[in-house]
Every structure is written in structure tokens, then in C-alpha cells.
Amino acid sequence: MKILFMGTPEFALFSLRAMVEAGENVVGVVTQPDQPKGRGYVLTPPPVKVYASGRGIPVYQPETLRGGAFAETLANIAPELIVVTAYGKILPQYVLDFPRFGCVNVHASLLPAYRGAAPMQRAILDGQPQTGITTMMMDAGLDTGDILLQGAVPIGPNDNFETVHDNMGKVGADVLLQTLRELREGTLRRLPQDGAQATYAAKIEKSDCKIDFARPAKAVHDLIRGLSPVPLAFTRLPDGKLLKIVRSEVAANSFPAAPAGTVLSTADGAITVACGTGAVRLLELIPEGKSRMSAAAFINGRKLQTGDILPF
């Protein structure tokens, strides 16, 4: 079975690598154009391009798929199946209709929950105890196609986006390979989604990253870990300078009542801040213009004191 793979970021690489190592006939990779990265804006290829090129797999980077722009190339590749993992663009109908076995998407949630652009982050931000992978037969809707197979992934209380991402990538690869096996064997079953149960995982915007200490401590902690290591939740220091938070935990000890945002303690290597209910311990952070550091190092250098207020 000739498979065309479509994907772009590190998460997609889990699926591509699994198929190649399993001996699947991946005849091409479609990914987004190289993008400028870093302070020097160096043109950088997507991870799947680097991997595919190193293994002699043809790589295609169309600027657009609209208006039949990719139709001739698609006809020349002539895939029997298209596998899509975090490609980042909507597939036009002519692409969806082309392969004999359809287009299978590896989606990072247990559909119909968390359809959309940021399912992993949103699940963590919502404090969910688990998420998972769904392989889905794509249609013209946004993550609305029939469910094929699913695999659950637990979210620990201190897991962040990075750890969940890597666990999801591994499970996604396994679920995809099982989907391909069952597709070949003719045992794959399609389950229509219940749209009434659907939720939407919107793209993470800058406004989502600002910490609101008036919220409960667990919600603040969930926000911080759900956005770590990128794009990172942030607050501001009393002088107005930006402070990004890399790692936190919910404070186990109780403290005297104080307004939300009040620094309750700078002991034990953490900045403990009052929340709407409870308190959160800030453990690692990135001050404006500085590198990542421990809270202890920041306290020693900046002399942040108990009673200071972090504005929100």
C-alpha cells in the first residue's frame, strides 16, 4: 500500500518514524515550507523533512493546496492512502477524495472531545486526568470524521505539555500502526462521532498565557504546566517586567489569608504566591531578558520579598 504522509512538527515525526521503521511503503512526505527560526531568523526545515530527506523519501513543500495547486503532484505520487498528523493546513476535497483507502488522521485527543488546534494543551489547562489518541477517517469537517481506533494517555498532576506531548507521540505511533494493520486485514470498523459530545480546543493565544492569580491554585498550576516549555505562562514583577514561569506546584502548606498575587514566601527554593484559593509555588522561571533559572537563583539576585504583589 503506497502511503503519502502529511505532517510538520515534532509530534508528526513519531508517526512518520514508526511507519518507516515498521517497513510501511511511505512514498512521499508533504510538509510545510521551511520557516525562519531563532534570533537570526535562519531558514529551518520542519522535523519531518529532515527525517525523510535523510532516508531518501521524496519531500514536497507546497505553499498552498487550494485551487488544485497540488493536484498534478498528487496524481504523479498516486498514493493509495494518505496519513495526516499535525500537518497544519485544511485538506481540500480533491485531496481527501484521491486515495483509494481515504485519508487517516492521527489526532491528539479522544474524539469527539478537543477537536481543533491545541488538544493536548487544552486538556492539561482544563486539569483533565487523561487524554488520548484517535485515528480518524477524515472528511470535510474539522476533526469530525469517523473514529477508527483510540488509545488513552494518562496526565499526571505535574505532567506538562512536553511530557504529555512525548507520551502522546508514542501512543499515536502505536495506534496508527494498528490502524494500518486492521485496514489491510479488512477488520477496521468506523464509528461516527457524536457531535453533541464534541468540545473545541482553540489555538493558544497570547491572552491565554497570562496568569490570573485570582483563580484557584490548581487552575494556575494547570495553566503553567499546560504551556511549558512553550509558549510559557507569564506574570509581571512589581516593577512591571515580564516573568515567564516554567515549572510550578500547588502549595501543600496553608498560609494566612492574603490578596491574590501576594508573595507569601521565598523560602525552600520557591516563590509561593497566593491564589483565589490556596497558593502556588513557582519553581523555575525566565525573567525578562534572562535565561531560564531556578526560583532560588532569582530570589537571590532580585531580592523579591514576602508581601510583594505580582500584578495580574
Image (cartoon, grey):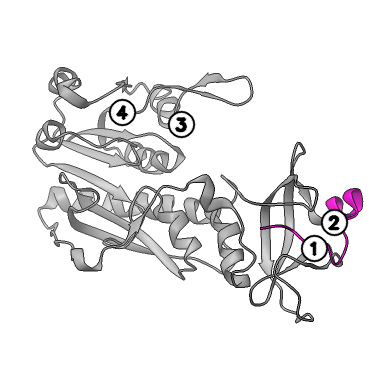
Determine if the magenta segment contains residue 23: no
From the image, tell me which residue sits under label 1.
270
Q: Earlier in the sequence, mark 2 or mark 3?
A: 3
Report helix, strand or loop for mark 4: strand
Question: Relative to 218, is 110 on the left or the right?
Answer: left
Determine if the magenta segment contains residue 303: yes
Above or below for 197 versus 177? below
From the image, tell me which residue sits under label 3.
47
Q: Are marks 1 and 4 in contact (CB under 8 Å)?
A: no
Residue type beneath disc 3: Pro
Distance CA(mark 2)–CA(mark 1)? 6 Å
From the image, tell me which residue sits under label 4.
29
Q: Comparing marks 2 and 3, which lies closer to the viewer?
A: 2
The magenta stretch is 296-312
Above or below for 52 versus 11? above
Residue type beneath disc 2: Ala
